[in-house]
């Protein structure tokens, strides 16, 4: 800042000060609380070496002091030659080192004062720094860190605490670009820098034509005060860092400009300050798991987004017991994916359900991890970048259900293929008040009671079946066939899981010893590995099974058959009786002869 100092000497009445800024910093100082024209002090001397202080006409020390408007105090000086030197700079300015010669003559009146101009330069800092972008995983070499946006904000405050709640006086934004670093430079090839001449400034709040404050040599500078550096937009697929770096530009006690930058390191190769901002990838994954037919496997649909373009990933998953949180051994599955064409989508991972006793009666929850695949030499390296492990997430949890099938087969020469046989299915351990479905011959719906129990009447005829759908794990079932004129028997087995590790034991039963008794299965438990359980009933009737007609059978044929059988039986009894009488007579006669 140039100051024009007017000395009113001899009979002078006033002193006027003008100001002239360094051209490239004029905007910075104008209206800036870190700069003021007030308080500059110029000592007058009687010798050019400035060792003998001058006094005014009243004998007082001759010092000019400026005010906020650039005017100095009035001095009344004796005629002569004086030497003026600045001894105290005004706020935000550096001392003018020049000594000015002022000659006071008789012509210097209040209207024509003796004057000199002092170009007091404003102080400013040169914030030489570059920002390095690094991948927190250091997993791959790719262009993914290009395009991060950094914002530099300038505050005209004296203390760091003054930043809180204050609006920046000016700010600039920059994008990172890929640049080649000198050999042995710090890690990272994605840079942004305030002092570059070939970087990519996005915007500035400057109202003038130039984006930056510059000194007379065209170098980018910042005024006195505080500035911050922060990331305001992350590269695609990475999280935004919450780090804020603080810089301070100030004048020390010696009048020298000092620039400090927290967290920066001076790099001898780059010959500037280096700030590293580390970004973490922010892939997101979500899942929906569903149990497949026969409970043999769980298909986990993994949705992903925010991956890095052009990279390879692998999703690894497994099942855990929802009740205990323990891993289901052998349930692991994986699926590879690439981001050549898209950074979001979904992939299926198959997790094995069959073969594990420990999940009997429990739900299972799918857990997943997403790994970035990179190469170190010839070796693949997997780095965990995301996971989804919420045991309470219903979308990740599957209930193990079982279908119960009841089927009928009628055999025997007298087996009635048109007869409807009656059954009662007793169920416990259901979800209270939940609705269930019976599909097939005697289709219907039923609701469990408040205790989770249900009794279901069913009817079946030859070659027909019903299926009770989606019984929950741990439920129990018992089936009773009402006694009829047919011998009843049953067999329990797995329809489709016998060769896949089904735990059900084949059981059977029959009422052939007493067909007038109902036949009931044992209470069986719904097990995860049984698949669809079949209770196969067979009813048979042959000629030798019953000689008396059914009570309700009044057909003519039956009556005739019965009458014929009765006549034959009576004749046989008569013959047997006559034979007996004849034998007794012979025995009596023989007895008399012996006597």
Image (cartoon, grey):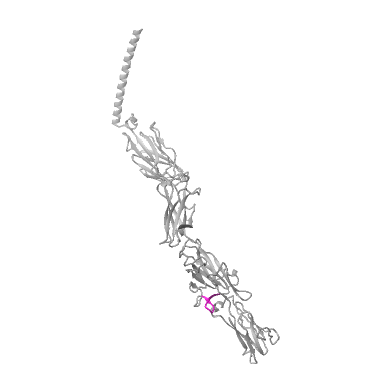
Q: Which quarter of the image is occupied by the N terminus? A: bottom right
- The outermost residue toward the bottom is 106
- The outermost residue toward the top is 595
Seen in the picture, residue 551 relative to 574 is either above or below; the reply is below
Q: Position of residue 282 (x, y in %)?
A: 48, 61
Residue 153's image quarter? Answer: bottom right
- The outermost residue toward the right is 59
Q: Is residue 384 left or right of residue 516?
A: right
Seen in the picture, residue 128 relative to 499 is either above or below; the reply is below
Which range is magenta?
Answer: 212-222
Q: Position of residue 156 (x, y in %)?
A: 57, 73
Q: Nearer the viewer, residue 403 or 257?
A: 257
Q: Which quarter of the image is occupied by the C terminus? A: top left
Q: Position of residue 268 (x, y in %)?
A: 55, 70
- The answer to whether residue 385 is visible is no
- The answer to whether residue 104 is visible is yes
Q: Is residue 372 magenta?
A: no
């Amino acid at each position: 800042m140039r100051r024009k100092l007017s000395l009113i000497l001899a009979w002078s009445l006033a002193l006027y000060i003008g100001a002239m800024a360094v051209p490239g910093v004029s905007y910075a100082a104008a209206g800036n609380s870190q700069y003021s024209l007030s308080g500059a002090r110029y000592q007058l001397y009687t010798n050019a070496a400035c060792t003998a202080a001058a006094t005014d006409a009243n004998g007082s020390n001759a010092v000019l002091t400026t005010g906020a408007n650039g005017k100095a105090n009035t001095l009344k000086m004796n005629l002569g030659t004086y030497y003026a030197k600045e001894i105290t700079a005004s706020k935000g300015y550096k001392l003018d080192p020049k000594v000015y010669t002022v000659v006071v003559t008789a012509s210097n009146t209040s209207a024509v004062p003796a004057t000199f101009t002092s170009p007091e330069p404003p102080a400013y800092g040169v914030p030489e720094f570059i920002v390095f972008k690094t991948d927190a995983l250091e997993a791959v070499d790719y262009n993914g860190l290009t395009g991060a946006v950094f914002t530099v904000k300038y505050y005209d405050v004296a203390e760091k605490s003054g930043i809180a709640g204050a609006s920046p006086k000016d700010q600039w934004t920059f994008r990172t670009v890929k640049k080649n670093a000198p050999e042995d430079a710090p890690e990272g090839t994605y840079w942004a820098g305030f002092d570059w001449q070939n970087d990519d400034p996005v915007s500035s709040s400057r109202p003038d034509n130039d984006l930056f404050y510059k000194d007379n040599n065209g170098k980018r500078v910042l005024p006195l005060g505080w500035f911050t550096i922060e990331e305001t937009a992350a590269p695609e697929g990475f999280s935004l860092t919450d780090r804020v770096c603080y810089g301070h530009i100030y004048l020390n006690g010696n009048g020298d400009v000092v620039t400090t930058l927290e967290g920066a390191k001076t790099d001898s190769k780059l010959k500037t300050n280096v700030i590293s901002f580390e970004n973490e990838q922010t892939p997101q994954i979500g899942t929906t798991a569903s149990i497949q037919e026969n409970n043999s496997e769980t298909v986990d649909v993994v949705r992903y987004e925010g991956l890095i373009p052009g990279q390879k990933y692998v999703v690894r998953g497994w099942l855990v017991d929802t009740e205990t949180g323990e891993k289901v051994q052998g349930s692991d599955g994986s699926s590879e994916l690439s981001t050549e064409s898209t950074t979001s989508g979904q992939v299926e991972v198959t997790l094995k359900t069959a073969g594990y006793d420990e999940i009997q009666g429990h739900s299972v929850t799918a857990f997943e991890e997403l790994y970035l695949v990179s190469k170190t030499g010839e070796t693949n390296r997997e780095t965990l970048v995301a996971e989804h492990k919420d045991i309470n997430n219903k979308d990740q949890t599957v209930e193990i259900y079982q279908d119960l099938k009841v089927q009928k087969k009628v055999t025997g020469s007298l087996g009635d293929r048109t007869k409807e046989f009656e059954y009662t299915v007793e169920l416990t351990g259901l979800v209270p008040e939940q609705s269930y479905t019976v599909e097939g011959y005697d289709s219907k719906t039923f609701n469990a009671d408040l205790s989770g129990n249900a009794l279901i009447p069913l009817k079946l005829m030859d070659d027909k079946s019903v299926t009770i759908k989606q019984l929950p794990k741990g439920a129990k079932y018992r089936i009773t066939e009402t006694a009829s004129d047919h011998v009843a028997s049953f067999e329990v087995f797995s329809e489709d899981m016998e060769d896949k590790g089904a735990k059900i034991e084949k059981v059977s039963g029959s009422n052939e010893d007493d067909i007038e008794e109902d036949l009931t299965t044992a209470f069986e438990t719904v097990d995860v590995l049984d698949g669809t359980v079949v209770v196969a009933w067979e009813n048979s009737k042959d000629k030798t099974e019953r000689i008396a007609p059914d009570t309700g059978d009044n057909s003519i044929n039956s009556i005739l058959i019965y009458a014929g059988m009765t006549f034959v039986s009576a004749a046989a009894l008569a013959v047997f009786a006559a034979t007996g009488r004849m034998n007794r007579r012979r025995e009596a006669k023989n007895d008399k002869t012996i006597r």
